[in-house]
Image: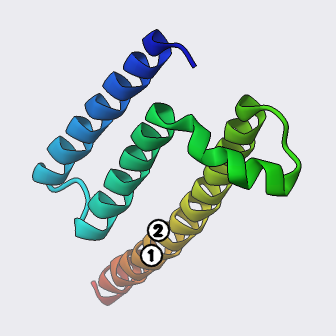
Amino acid sequence: MTYTLKIIGILFAAAMIYLTFLNFKRRSYGKKSFVLWLLVWLFFMFMVTFPETAYGIMSGLGIQRTVDFFVMGGLLFFSVMIFYMYISVKRIEKKVEGIVRRDAIMSHEKKASK
């Protein structure tokens, strides 16, 4: 990997760490999410800086090219994130449905009592 790509990757990870910290300070998410994303960006920065550390894992999996390894890792990571987001959205939908149902029942009861 060329030094230019390493520098770009490190700068990107540093910018994402900064944005993660800013959103944590704005209370956009809690400590657990902050630590998770901080670890993700630090891992990204480490892998960009020292890509040869992945060679042992790659040889065990039979992967020849480093790019293939990172693409597969990225797909796995984003698949997990999408599944987590799907579950979160479904949970929020149930809560909203319960609130709307309760509000509709109370509104109907108020009209019926008049």
Find the residue positioned furthest to the right.
Answer: 62
Q: Quadrant of residue 81?
A: bottom right
- Tell me what residue is drawn at x 45 percent, y 75 percent: 95
Q: Position of residue 57 (x, y in %)?
A: 71, 54
**Badge 1: how crowded within 10 Å, few (<14), some, or many (20+)?**
few
44 sits left or right of 56 in the view: left
Which label number is shown at residue 35?
A: none
Q: 64 or 22: which is nearer to us?
A: 64
- Tell me what residue is drawn at x 21 percent, y 37 percent: 18
Q: Position of residue 99 (x, y in %)?
A: 39, 76
Q: Position of residue 22 (x, y in %)?
A: 15, 42
Q: 54 or 24: which is nearer to us?
A: 54
Q: Which residue is mark 1?
A: 95
Q: Which residue is mark 2?
A: 92
Q: 107 or 39: which is nearer to us?
A: 39
| SS at badge 1 | helix
CB contact under 8 Å: marks 1 and 2:
yes
Which amino acid is tagged 1? Lys
Which amino acid is tagged 2? Ile
Quadrant containing the C terminus is bottom left
- Tell me what residue is drawn at x 12 percent, y 49 percent: 26
In the image, is residue 4 above or below residue 107?
above
Q: Quadrant of residue 108?
A: bottom left
In three-dimensional space, the C-alpha distance between marks 1 and 2, rounded to whole angstroms, equals: 5 Å
Q: Position of residue 46 (x, y in %)?
A: 43, 42
Q: Number of numbered discs present?
A: 2
- Tell me what residue is drawn at x 58 percent, y 19 percent: 1
